[in-house]
């Protein structure tokens, strides 16, 4: 399929989302109140002194004059607040799209480029932009699909509270998906080849897969594809990025499994399993304390010093990043194991999301890209700061 064909498909998705947005907003609009309801005042009990004086003489019975029909003023109708299009404020969209979680996205493409042995370039930035758009599309689509459930469990969210219309969220998801595919197309055909299944996985997860056992694996696949997108856009071999994508996918699988119980809590088994999995990932990221130094092969220069054990180069930096990842993800998970209540479970999910940043930095450092690792790790304080104002779950 050519690039123009894929862009046409993306535009068709956007048009369908906009049409569905208008239809859903029209169906969800409440009926206007009757004129009698708007004109009547508050009801009160009828008192004795409100009745007219009753007498045996019909002439003595006063009758209230009836106003002429022409003199009765028409009731003033004001549009009900829910009848106005709920487009929301910028703060509402920040909450809907969970903007603090965006800081966990650029590291995917950067780690993918590092794993492929390429320095970040213009196409890598296009892959980062595509990842951001597809991630935001997933956030908007997630709340659109969960609006009925959130009305009972999270009525303060933008959609169930009525601050943003469901149709507006659906239209935003379609537009962001189209933009993400267009940016991937600009990065090259290999990037678009990865972005199309990534977008399909996001939509499939939000529209159905997350409600059964396939939810965590689908989310893990989406994150792994996001890292592979950076490798494909940078012009490197996708095969070299598979180990890093697998590590990121395993972490995502564990955190997503915990998130399925974040509003109910009550089970310590899932956080305990996630703690074991993420501990294994941290152990795999940590460099060996000592590396075996062997004599040089034929025709090669012999290393300085006798054969034996030596410290691995760059081991301290990699160890610090692996330790930062472990500390970010392990502590809230341990609290959720000890007390699997909804608040602590949600905190564990938030910690798992923020832990993706040091994980991405550690993957870049392991691939031999310390500058990329430092740039990625610098996003962690920003994510932590903004997460205090807007929840990432």
Image (spheres, helix red, strand yellow):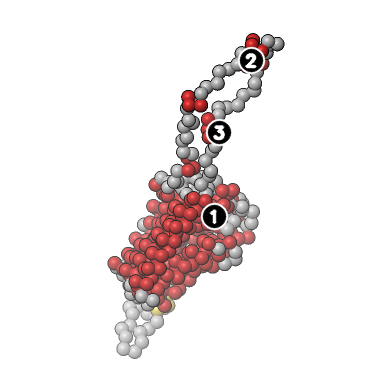
Q: Nearer the viewer, mark 1 or mark 3?
A: 3
Q: Which of the marked residues, 1 or 3, is nearer the chain's N terminus?
A: 3
In the rendering, which numbered label is found on residue 52? 2
**Picture residue at 55% right of the left edge, 46% below the top:** 155
Do we see residue 209 in this rendering?
A: yes
- Outermost residue, left side: 122
Quarter holding the N terminus is: bottom left
Query: Disc 1 to disc 3, how far (Cα)?
Result: 34 Å
Q: In this view, does 265 lie to the left or right of 185?
A: right
Determine whether 345 is above or below 188 in the image. above
Give the SS element for disc 3: helix
Count residues near mark 2 (Cα–Cα under 10 Å), then give few for <14, some for 14-19, many for 20+: few
Q: Identify residue for label 3.
A: 37
Q: Position of residue 273 (x, y in %)?
A: 59, 63
Q: Identify residue for label 1.
A: 146
**Picture residue at 34% right of the left edge, 71% below the top:** 4
Q: Position of residue 347 (x, y in %)?
A: 53, 52
In the rendering, which numbered label is found on residue 56? none
**Picture residue at 68% right of the left edge, 10% below the top:** 57
Give the SS element for disc 2: loop
Determine whether 133 is above or below 300 in the image. above
Check whether the beta carbons of the residues at disc 3 and disc 2 lie within 8 A of each other: no
Q: Which of the marked residues, 3 or 2, is nearer the chain's N terminus?
A: 3
State the image quarter where residue 7 is shown. bottom left
């Amino acid at each position: 399929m050519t690039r123009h064909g894929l862009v046409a498909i993306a535009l068709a998705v956007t048009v369908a989302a906009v049409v569905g947005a208008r239809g859903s907003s029209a169906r969800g609009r409440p009926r206007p109140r009757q004129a009698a309801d708007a004109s009547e005042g508050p009801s009160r009990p009828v008192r004795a002194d409100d009745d007219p004086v009753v007498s045996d003489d019909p002439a003595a019975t006063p009758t209230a004059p009836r106003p002429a029909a022409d003199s009765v003023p028409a009731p003033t109708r004001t549009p009900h607040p829910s009848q106005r299009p709920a487009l929301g404020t910028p703060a509402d969209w920040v909450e809907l799209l969970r903007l603090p979680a965006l800081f966990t996205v650029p590291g995917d493409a950067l780690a993918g480029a590092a794993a492929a042995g390429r320095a970040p370039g213009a196409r890598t930035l296009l892959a980062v932009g595509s990842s951001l758009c597809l991630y935001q599309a997933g956030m908007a689509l997630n709340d659109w699909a969960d609006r009925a459930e959130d009305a009972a469990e999270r009525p303060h969210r933008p959609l169930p509270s009525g601050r943003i219309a469901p149709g507006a969220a659906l239209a935003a998801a379609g537009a962001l998906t189209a933009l993400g595919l267009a940016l991937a197309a600009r990065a090259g055909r290999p990037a678009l080849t990865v972005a199309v299944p990534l977008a399909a996985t996001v939509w499939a997860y939000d529209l159905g897969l997350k409600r059964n056992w396939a939810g965590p694996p689908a989310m893990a696949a989406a994150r792994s594809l996001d890292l592979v997108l950076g490798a494909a856009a940078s012009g490197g071999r996708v095969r070299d990025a598979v180990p890093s994508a697998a590590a990121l996918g395993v972490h995502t699988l564990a955190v997503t499994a915990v998130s399925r119980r974040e509003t109910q809590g009550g089970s310590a088994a899932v956080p305990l399993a996630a703690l074991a999995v993420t501990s294994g990932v941290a152990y795999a990221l940590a460099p060996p304390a000592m590396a075996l130094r062997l004599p040089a092969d034929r025709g090669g220069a012999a290393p300085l010093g006798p054969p034996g054990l030596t410290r691995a180069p760059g081991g301290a930096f990699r160890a610090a990043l692996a330790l930062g990842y472990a500390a970010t993800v392990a502590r809230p998970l341990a609290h959720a194991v000890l007390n699997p209540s909804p608040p602590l479970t949600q905190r564990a999910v938030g910690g798992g999301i923020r832990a993706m940043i040091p994980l991405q930095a550690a993957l870049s450092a392991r691939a031999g890209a310390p500058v990329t690792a430092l740039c990625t790790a610098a996003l962690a304080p920003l994510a932590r700061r903004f997460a205090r104002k807007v929840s990432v779950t």
